Amino acid sequence: MSHTKKENKWFKPMFEFGEDLLTESKTNNNDNPLLQSPVKNTINGNEKPFKIQNINHKSLMKNFDPKTIEDLAVHNKKVQEVDDWLKVVCVGNNNDMLLLTGPVGCGKTITIRLLAEKYNIKVTEWITPIDIDIPTEYGEFEYNGKQSTQFLSFVLKAANFTSLLDGNSEKLVLVEDLPNTFTRTPSEFTEVLQQYKLRGKSPIVFICSESHTDNKNSAINLFTPTLKEQFGIQHITFNGVSPTGLKAALKRVAGIISKKYADVYNIPKVDLIECVSNSSAGDIRSAVLNLHFACLKGSNYNLETSIIEKDQKLTKKRKTTSSKFTSLGKDQTVSILHGVGRVLNPKVILENGRKKLTHSPDEIIEQFTSQPTSFVNFIAENYLPHFSIVEHVDKAASLLSDADFLLAEWREKMCQEYGLYISTAGLMLANEAPVSAWNPVRGPKTMKIQYPSPYELHLEDNYFCKGKVLVTDYETYCKIIGDKKTNEINSVYTL
Amino acid sequence: MSLWVDKHRPRDLMKLDFHKDQAIRLKNLVQQSDFPHLLVYGPSGAGKKTRIMCLLRELYGSGVERLRQETMNFTTPSNKKIEIMTVSSNYHIEVNPTDVGIHDRVVIMDLVKNIAQTHQIDSSGQREFKVVILNEVDDLTKDAQHALRRTMEKYVATCRLILIANSISRVIPAIKSRCLTIRVPAPTESEIASVLHIVCKKEGLSLPSDLAIRIAKCADRNLRRALLMCEACKVQQYPFTADQKVSEPDWQLFIRDTASMILSEQSPKKLGDVRQKLYELIIHGVPPDMIFAGLLKELVLNCDMSMKSKIASYAAKYEHRMRLGNKPIFHLEAFVAKFMAIYKKSLEECIGDMF
């Protein structure tokens, strides 16, 4: 029986559909799939017994996966790029390598899978196993061998041997879940790649998600440019899914819902789709999840209506939908340029006779993900053209000075926040007579100090002076003296 | 090309031209077999380095003057590779840890450790310690200064540190107390003038005393600058005349230019232009504190007494901020903006009074 097997699993899925159904049927040993749930009834306020369809939890999200390449929300050109690579590579015993990077949920994996299906290529994926088993009763561990060796042998087997059941189709190895050991010792990874290059007989695809913080970015740390060159790894970067792509994909999901699963989901309305696609910031996976959650019948009826209400209120103001719809979506993030714009062109609205900023400084700071210093540098570089009166500039500049002072204290985390707050709030309020003109945003200057070298100043090897002293004392006079000397030398030669 | 500054640099403690009492004391210090860590401080161009080199010569003989330049590599804990230029002889090594910015701590710790762990090969008839000279100690980060404190204690048996700073106000007390502090004050104008006379005599030139005094005044009590000015004067016009032109450093002219820009118009747009000028100065390598001082000097010329005090106090405030903060441009700009606001207000009041 299937659920005895399930019992043996060492963890239980937390959100399992029809879990209660299973237990119910086990105890009652009843074939009747209908279940009368009093709880559901009260929520629905329905007299009719509510029928829960048993959605197999494994395919819960798979129901909405794109089935054809046309369904993909990824930009056509990107798909074409990957397609071209696959076409070339899947002929013969080719062991080319491809690296796919992009933000989370932009459709990297599904693109590869669909394209592989199209060309009838068998994809074998590596999933890092736990290298220590669950301890036995006596607390003994069994060590499963080195991760990198395991990885290598798996990858080679997957690349070189076909399953008997598969027929003789082409193969492709997919690695999305790189073993941790490689991040610690990248040299091991290089060795594995070397081995693969020698012995592997199928193309291999690495997929890396990009994150905001560089230090966790395996694509950058592991796949260095030299490595890419050494092994001829092609690199294709995906962008986040465009809003139109998102919307189209969500509409497709809505279509599937209305066709097949109308009894589980409410059919999503257009404005709900809009809301979800706005809040997901190019992440198709979370968008579909959100849509799924928002449409689910019965599970959270109140929440859903409240969203729609909110949304209806907001459609009048249109543009602000994205920032308010956070109850379902992820936290909204603002790009740095966007943030700079909001600080330097603060919009003030009158509310009950009192002035109020449309975006409060708190809000801007909260939605902000990059380093405070880089943001403050951006503001400082760009604030001047927005001011018309020198007194206001004085106020703003002095606040920026305060902010820099606070930001310099990196040991105290609060200081960073205060510094950022002072600069944002200060600049939003300091400018009482803004200039309304379009000003391009400039990046902050890099202040790399260029000291002249003693050689440039025609000094003999002079180890006494460096940097500052050369600039402040020597430079001017060396020029004067040096010019004269070279003139003299020249005149001697001409004589 | 060999400049007068380098050519006529005294090489012996007894041949120094000023602060002779101090020279005698330094000699006595060295004649005893051992000496403590030193912290030499004083304004730029007062002769700190000259005295240290004399001291080393006294210690090790003329071998210290055979210098070589090397690049050393270090790796920070975050696996960043950094390079730093060092100047060394067989007996000492000199380094400027601020060249590597915030990674100065690594340099100090690794460098001193390396030096201290290698003993002198031939210790008979030699001192049993090496000397590490660290420049610009006041610009070190607090982290590096604390690292220094530990290193100083740990390796005291095999190496001595000589720290050089412009002012000890930013050196942490822990370091001050571990060193013998030696202050090298800037030479007075008459001392500078006499040095100029001596140097000119050595070169076989005759220098009018009026010109010597003018150069000394111009040089801001900086002997190095005075000697360079003098040589530049010689190149421009010889025989000397008492009223010949003494050229100022470029960057001072540039700051004066910037100050007149500030005085000409007080508007955000002008401030934008001023900022570009300040950027240029900073990128060129002029230290921000000197920009501050130069600007203040030029700007207060056009103010009455009450304004002067106000502006000077603001300058002090922002300069202090700048020391504590990261980006000098912020504070320079804040000062300029403040000046503009005050100056504009006073101008408007003046015009108001006239009618």
Image: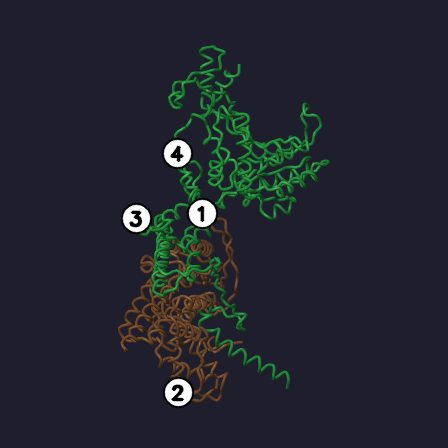
Chain colours: A green, B brown
Name the amino acid, label 2. Ser
Q: What residue appears at the point 33 percent right and 71 percent down from the top-left corner?
A: B343
Judge by depth and name the residue closer to the eye, A128 or A100. A100
The answer to whether residue B277 is seen in the rendering is yes
Query: Which sits earlier in the primary sequence, circle 4 or circle 1?
Result: 4
Q: Residues within 10 Å of mark 1 (few under 14, many from 20)?
A: some
Vertical placement of residue B241 versus A72, above or below: below
Q: Are marks 4 and 2 in contact (CB under 8 Å)?
A: no
Vertical placement of residue A357 versus A122, above or below: below
Judge by depth and name the residue closer to the eye, A275 or A365. A275
- Using residue A395 as the reference point, say whether residue A253 is left or right of it: right
- Using residue A114 as the reference point, say whether residue A461 is left or right of it: left
Do marks 1 and 2 both belong to one polypeptide chain? no
The picture places residue B219, in percent across and down from the top left corner, at 40, 77
Q: Residue A100's quadrant in the figure?
A: top right
Q: Chain of mark 2?
A: B
Name the amino acid, label 4. Ser
Q: Residue B326's quadrant in the figure?
A: bottom left
Do marks 4 and 2 both belong to one polypeptide chain? no
Find disc 1 in the rendering and name its residue: A334
Q: Chain of mark 4?
A: A
Task: Work out how far the residue at label 3 is from the one at label 4, CA to CA, in angstroms.
Answer: 26 Å
Q: Are marks 4 and 1 in contact (CB under 8 Å)?
A: no
Find disc 4 in the rendering and name its residue: A306
The picture places residue A32, in percent across and down from the top left corner, at 48, 12
Task: Work out how far the residue at label 2 is from the one at label 3, CA to CA, in angstroms.
Answer: 78 Å
The picture places residue A133, in percent across and down from the top left corner, at 50, 26
The answer to whether residue B323 is seen in the rendering is no
Find disc 2 in the rendering and name its residue: B209
Q: Chain of mark 3?
A: A
Front: mark 3 or 4:
3
Do marks 2 and 3 both belong to one polypeptide chain? no
